[in-house]
Amino acid sequence: MSFDNTNLSWTLIPDGNLPINTRYSTAVVGLDNSTIFQIGGFIRNKDTLDYDFSKQVYTYDYPTSKWTTPSIIGDNVSPKQQISGVIDNLGIIYIFGGVNTTNLTAFMGFLYNDMNTLDTSSLTWRTLSISQNLPLSTSDYSADILPNGIIVYIGGQEYTGVPVFSLVEMKSIKLFDTKKLEWSYMNATGDDVDPRWLFTSVLTPDGYIIIFGGCTKSFYSVSPNLALLDTNKSPYEWSIPSNSKANSPPSIYSHSANLYFNYMIITFGYNVDDQIYNSQVYLYNITSNKWVTSFNPPVPTTKSPSTSTSIRGTHASTNILTTPTKKSSNGLAIGLGLGISAAAVIIGIFAIILIFRRRSQILEIAGDR
């Protein structure tokens, strides 16, 4: 279904109440493409508003519109906030680092550099035993998993000692091999991109990571608002599309971003310059590298497995997703935490919005079952 971002239709799904309030968490869709795993964050009892970290994982089943609190076995994993999770093709969710807040008055705690995994099939936590080449403790990064199983970690803040926390240079890329369970590092080339945290990223079918938004440590705007990291090259290369500056959204952070067909969809967050919450939905067309105001999904077609199409012309050719590749056809789910923290996940061919706040209800936009 096509829609215009200035005239969205919202519909409440009354049964979608999350058992708790949460922010600075991560949301990941399982391989069945109908289960959302909501992990970590600053978790509060939604009735008493007291902090409660006794449960770290909640699941939302799209077909039944129900939240559950599954029993998780395995290693004892500390509560984490300011994290980003990715899932591999075996159904293993990887969560690196993050903050374990111990002082809930000043919101201060420990920054981690461990790698935890959640097996979504057996519902088992595991803390990987890695001693070689460990990165510095990091949070508020972006994470994207490539088809070869390499997780690309960009930006955020890390513990360096002087000062206590520093923003990571955007050309300093952390790489984790999910097949070898090994860390490596890369110095990217190309255009300069300001260090940032509280930003988002999406991975395109042709191997580009698009980052958007974020802010400095002092919550000022960063430049550029949008940049591309080409992972087809070695080393990876940053570039700033010239077309991306026209009609660009304002500087925002703690928003959500999701790639849906040829569109990156930006929602929620906080406007750096105007100091207000963002209620606008922004659309970025990855084929033209332009900000647009309307969403027009392509007509589903059947392509031969051997047919490939380059969506950027001058770079590596890959198959464009003309139809969803997962099982169900449900929607785009976007989670918003208490305050301004948001997370986004894909479920299929129509959009739902999960708002994790006081009453934690679910809304739909652009729905077309």
Image (tube, rainbow, N blue to C red):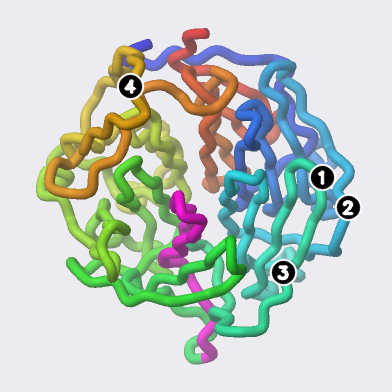
Mark number, residue 128:
3
Residue 212 placed where, x, y %? 33, 50
Horizontal relation, residue 53 to residue 165: left or right: right
255, above or below 99, in the image? above
N-terminal of the pair, mark 4 or mark 1, is 1
Badge 2: residue crowd in 10 Å (few <14, some 14–19, many ≥20): few
Mark number, residue 303:
4
Q: Residue at x 52, y 8 (%)?
A: 369
Horizontal relation, residue 303 to residue 163: left or right: left
Q: Residue at x 10, y 49 (%)?
A: 242
Asked if the residue under mark 2 is in contact with the one under mark 1, i.e. CB atoms within 8 Å, the reply is: yes
Mark number, residue 276:
none
Q: CA–CA distance between discs 1 and 2?
A: 8 Å
Residue that carries the numbered disc 1 in the rendered image: 122
N-terminal of the pair, mark 3 or mark 2, is 2
Q: CA–CA distance between discs 1 and 3?
A: 16 Å
Judge whether residue 26 can be spotted in this image: yes
State the extent of the magenta-drawn residues as a range. 142-161
